[in-house]
Amino acid sequence: MHEVMIITGGSRGIGAATAKLAARKGYRVCLTYRGNRQAADEVVAEITRDGGEAIALAADVSVERDVVGLFESVDRALGPVGVLVNNAGILETRSRVEAMDAERLARVLAVNVTGSFLCAREAVHRMSTKRGGAGGAIVNLSSAASRLGGPNEFVDYAAAKGAIDTFTIGLAKEVADEGIRVNAVRPGLIYTDIHGSGGQPDRVDRLKDSVPMQRGGYPEEVARAILWLASDEASYSTGSFINVDGGR
């Protein structure tokens, strides 16, 4: 039986690219979506056409009952999870901190931070060798913004990703002797739809000259880093980060 991978927010961008690459490498994939069922079904259809195995499940990772239900559904449909990719994330429209309200901050932190904690909790329950599991790997999606700060645009998002960095280090140490590795990838300017949801669909092209490599990145380039961290090739790596940001 091939290993099971859960990818949150897998209907587009980095999540979709990760799902497709994982299936090609033999993983049995569950990708989650919050609202765009059609996009998720299209990813599953492409994987199935190529001979892979995948399912798509609706889940809002910021809602605890959705997360619990997600993992229980995967248990029944695919079997015990071996890899969790905490990819689901949101970006609000561009704003300075002085204009941000509590509701915006709550939304950003709920999905980007709380969602990752809840999904990791359920994964640890199933993976931990101290609980009878077979071990596993968790890969968190951070961002170059956690180091750069997102000034004048997305300080809230950057701060959420800073929390993910700390979460990655802490959880990695917590479960290192339970057969679970926890690492993170920090993408930079990547061509995905998230920039459109932030009100700047042309953001990558506008800023790419500030990247040492002078170009934006592609979801597949991030997916390759995620799959390496998930694999046995990274067997002695935990609490670590791969920057996929063109040198920013």
Image (tube, grey):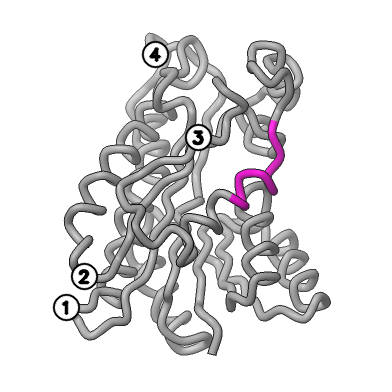
User: Mark 2: which secondary structure?
Assistant: helix
Q: Tell which circle, 2 or 3, labels the residue nearer the N-terminal end.
A: 2
Of residue 133 and residue 109, the one placed in the foreground of this image is 133
* Tag 3 residue: 243
Q: How many marks?
A: 4
Q: Which residue is mark 2?
A: 178
At which x and y percent is residue 51? 77, 81
Is 221 included in the stretch rendered in magenta?
A: yes
Q: Which residue is mark 1?
A: 130
Q: Residue furthest right?
A: 49
Report crowding for label 4: few under 14, some 14 to 19, many 20 or more residues within 10 A (C-alpha): few
Crowd rating for badge 3 (residues with CA inside 10 Å; few <14, some 14–19, many 20+)? some
Q: Is residue 76 rendered to the left or right of residue 53?
A: left
Where, quadrant-wise, is the C terminus in this rendering?
top right
Residue 148, position as x, y percentages in the image: 44, 18
Please state which of the two labelled residues, at mark 4 or mark 1, is closer to the viewer: 1
Q: Earlier in the sequence, mark 4 or mark 1?
A: 4
Chief secondary structure of the magenta portion = helix
- The local secondary structure at tag 1 comes to helix
Distance between the alpha carbons at the discs numbered 2 and 3 = 26 Å
- Taking the spot 47% from the left edge, 45% from the top edge, the residue there is 141
* Sequence-wise first label, 3 or 4: 4
Disc 3 residue type (three-letter): Asn
Circle 4 is placed at which residue position?
Answer: 97
Q: CA distance from mark 2 to mark 4?
A: 40 Å
Q: Which residues are magenta?
A: 217-224
